[in-house]
Amino acid sequence: MIDLHCHILPGLDDGPVTMDESLAMARMAAADGVRVIVATPHVDREFQEPHPDLVRKLVASLNQTIQAEQLPLRVLPGGEAPAEPELLEALQDGRVLTVGDRGRHVLVELPSNVPATYAPELFFRLQLAGYTPVIAHVERAAIFRVEPKMLAEFRDRGYQLQMNVEALRRGFGTGRYARRLLRDGLVTILASDGHGAVRRKPLLSPARAALRNGRLFEQLTLTNPGRLLLPPPAPRSRTQEEKAAPLSPKLADSQEG
């Protein structure tokens, strides 16, 4: 399994404080069957902290510790950015890490207390610039309760819709709402949003029982997140583009003759 949203790095946000706590989370995730974690520390509203180089450094250090313990787990750099108008500029300036540091997808958090009516324009600008929004814990975002049709619109535009596993385990309204989103095909990725080894654990397997659908569980925890971590396609040379370009009818006729 791949956990695309997890606060596993120490000392950066409201996740673990020490590297030992981060390692405890890694042990727990590996035992659960997770093989890849994208570290997603919260990015501040000014897009200044944490610096991407610090995130990469902590990821490298944690991976060394994981390898020393021979855990079957790898951590990749990333971040959880606020949906602010300056997000695109921050991405282009290299102040915000993309998912897995692949340069294509960005994990974005929408506010839970006020509807982010500006979201469609912001996400459209990101997409025009070559970034695909991955909307964090869609079950929390206030805008989707006010504008429920917007989730389907975002899905149809190719945006990724991430839900937290813990939402499926809650009772009352939250759990029913989360299950309805899944039933309606409005979730493309399940992640833990883990913050510790005691509270908000980095586990994905509890969703398997909640879903009661092994194929869907695999799609949401492996297939779909795996696509986001593929390396970017190599740039095509002009010669390759010319070879791949279809011939015009006139040229095709002349070559056949």
Image (cartoon, helix red, strand yellow):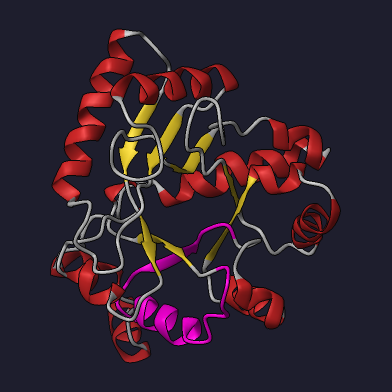
| Residue 233 x %, y % | 29, 55
Position of 206 with respect to 253 (left or right) is: right
The number of numbered badges drawn on the structure is 0
The percent position of residue 75, horizontal first and vertical second, equals: 35, 32
Q: In the figure, 16 relative to 40: above or below?
A: above
- Residue 180 falls in which quadrant of the image? bottom right
Q: In the image, is 192 to the left or to the right of 60?
A: right
Q: Residue at x 21, y 64 (%)?
A: 240
- Position of 79 compared to 61: left or right? right
Q: Is residue 198 above or below residue 117?
A: above
Taking the image as shown, residue 120 lies to the left or right of residue 176, namely: left
Q: Quadrant of the N terminus?
A: top right
- In the rendered image, residue 113 lying in the magenta stretch gets the answer yes
Residue lying at the far top in this picture: please name it: 69
Q: Position of residue 46 (x, y in %)?
A: 24, 69
Q: Residue at x 57, y 23 (%)?
A: 33
Relative image position of residue 208 (x, y in whole percent): 74, 34
Looking at the image, residue 228 lies above or below residue 184: above
Residue 110 drawn above or below residue 230: below
Q: Quadrant of residue 107?
A: bottom left
Residue at the image point whose x is 22% and y is 42% from the top: 55
Q: Nearer the viewer, residue 12 or 35?
A: 12
- Residue at the spot x=57%, y=80% of the render? 115
Quadrant of the drawing holding the C terminus:
bottom left
Residue range corresponding to the magenta coloring: 112-137
In the image, is residue 28 part of the stretch drawn in magenta?
Answer: no
In this view, the residue in front, 96 or 225, is: 96
